[in-house]
Amino acid sequence: MTPPPSNVSGTVHDRIWQHAQAAPDTVAVVDDDGTTLTYRELTDRADAVARDLAWLDVTTEQVVGVCWPRSVDGLVRVLGVLRAGAALLCLDPDWPEQRLRHMTAACAVQLVLDRWYGLRVLDVQQRPAAAVLPMVHGPLCYAVFTSGSTGTPKGVLVEHPGVLNMAVELARIFQVGPGTTVLQFANWSWDAAMCEILMTLTAGGTLLLAPPAVRGGGPDLADLLRRHAVNVVTLTPSVLDALPTADLPALRTVVSVGEPCRPALVARWSTPDRQVFNGYGPTETTVAATVAACTPGADVHIGTPLPNVTTRVVDEHGHEVVAGNAGELLIGGIGVARGYAGNVAATAARFTTDAQGRRWYHTGDLVARRPDGALDYLGRADDQIKIRGHRIELGEIEHVIAELPAVRSCAVTTVADQLVAFVVAAEDTDTAAGPSTSPAPDPDHLPDLVLAHARTQLAAFAVPSTAVVVPALPLTANGKLDRDTLTAWAAARIAAPSAAAADAPAADATLRMVLQVVTHVLDLPVDPDTDFIDAGGHSLLVAQLCVALSEAFGRDVPYLTVAMHRTPAGLAAAIDATTGPVHPHPAIGGASSTRG
């Protein structure tokens, strides 16, 4: 299916500089520390970076690295690289050196703008196979690496025409323009960040850079959105599930990306003045390929293609399937990337050309086309598991459990030939439409409710052996569900569940709850004097701990409180000191039920 084409020409940085000429004093970017740049200031500083790169003979198609924390200064470097005509590769300073070396080598990076070391000139012995990949639609805009969950991370080479098409069309759909404030939440190494940045600045909007303290979502992120009157956010369902919806009057567009969006999430975030969208698109098709405007109470689909994007649904032989039948989704059009840097074989395997000369990316995702052309996402073609001879779709089990009103979110994993469901309880007071009239679920009984519901909807072999209530699901740095951590949780639950919380003094309900929550966040047994940082905690886990504690105690536990009081005993004392001893929800993070 191909939508009507749009008239898109030029580059993203051309559009940004046009806004700087038309409205130079409009605020382009702001951070939570109060640093603000107008479009004139932003483009002037980026021009200075571009002149430095030109002096170094940087040319079109050359990939330049930017190793910089998310900041206004970092954004200046990002735009300076594009303005110089080079292609951008964002490098996360927190990543292991070996991974960064692989990325720079695969893209033949010779220059890196580094926050700590200034301009670094790398020794590149020879250009990799990426250099022989032919131009498809236009010059290279950026390279971004996939997660590497199936092996060595692959660098996707994305061209300017597809990036501009994505930015212009999403700004139109999400109504981004002058006077609109858009949250920049995604890690810069993830392609969603390119969408947030370029969609906003090409449309003349204002970009709010999220500080590290809110990366885990939760009350701190909600406070940021409230204080800066943010209008548009793009977040994963995992982050949205942990984010309070109350008192966000300026927020009018919520875009769910990166993971399947559920009807309960749409219902929770929709209001008469707020539209929820479900966005879909692999990195290899320039961030977004399809978008759906979601309706509360209706099934959630992934929508129809953007202008200049084409989709096909095919069987295992490559033949188009009829509407309603499942098949693999192929994506064509202007957004299809050039290929994988330094990996001609992988490019040939996933990017194909048909007899008419049209180029297609094979997503590996199963979909079915509706009569109206919209696509239903059915899961990954390779996401099946086999337990005791039965093929099982984890997504199907998760969908069934998520139907329960008492469940906000869930994830299912397998370990030792057993299925384990992790669920986050719904809150009765946290909906966009206002308080619910139904009582909050009792975490002690929720696991039994989950398993009983699963037995009525699933074959016996697909019913989880155990259901566990947790304060929040684990997330990766990109805000997606961390399935590796989930599997570790399941192994710990089945092998030897931690008894630390149960061993806490019976009179200290606050400490018992803190021990339960810290145990689940760290996935380690802890005692009252365990130092959270020494036990493996880092900034992202601190943010997740804030979310989990806030959910468990029903009130805001600030990031600073967790950072300053690093033991469960210290945290419990700090929480009690705010308004006196509290009565946390019973057994959040510890309740479980095992299938008999």
Image: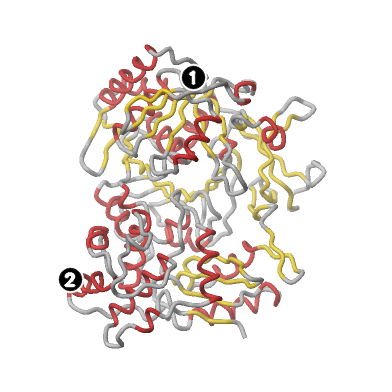
Tell me residue 445's x, y (percent).
Answer: 48, 83
Neighbour tally class for label 1: few under 14, some 14-19, many 20 plus, Cα within 10 Å = few
Look at the image and tell me in which quarter the C terminus lies: bottom right
Q: Nearer the viewer, residue 258 or 150?
A: 150
Tell me residue 38's x, y (percent).
Answer: 25, 28
SS state under label 1: loop
Q: Nearer the viewer, residue 518 or 268?
A: 518
Residue plotted at (64% across, 75% down)? 463
Q: Give above or below for 352 relative to 531.
A: above
| Quadrant in which residue 34 is drawn | top left
Look at the image and tell me in which quarter the N terminus lies: top right
SS state under label 2: helix
Residue plotted at (40% across, 55% down)? 272
| Quadrant in which residue 501 is drawn | bottom left
Q: Nearer the viewer, residue 25 or 513?
A: 513
Q: Which residue is mark 2?
A: 578
What is the number of the mark on residue 10? Answer: 1
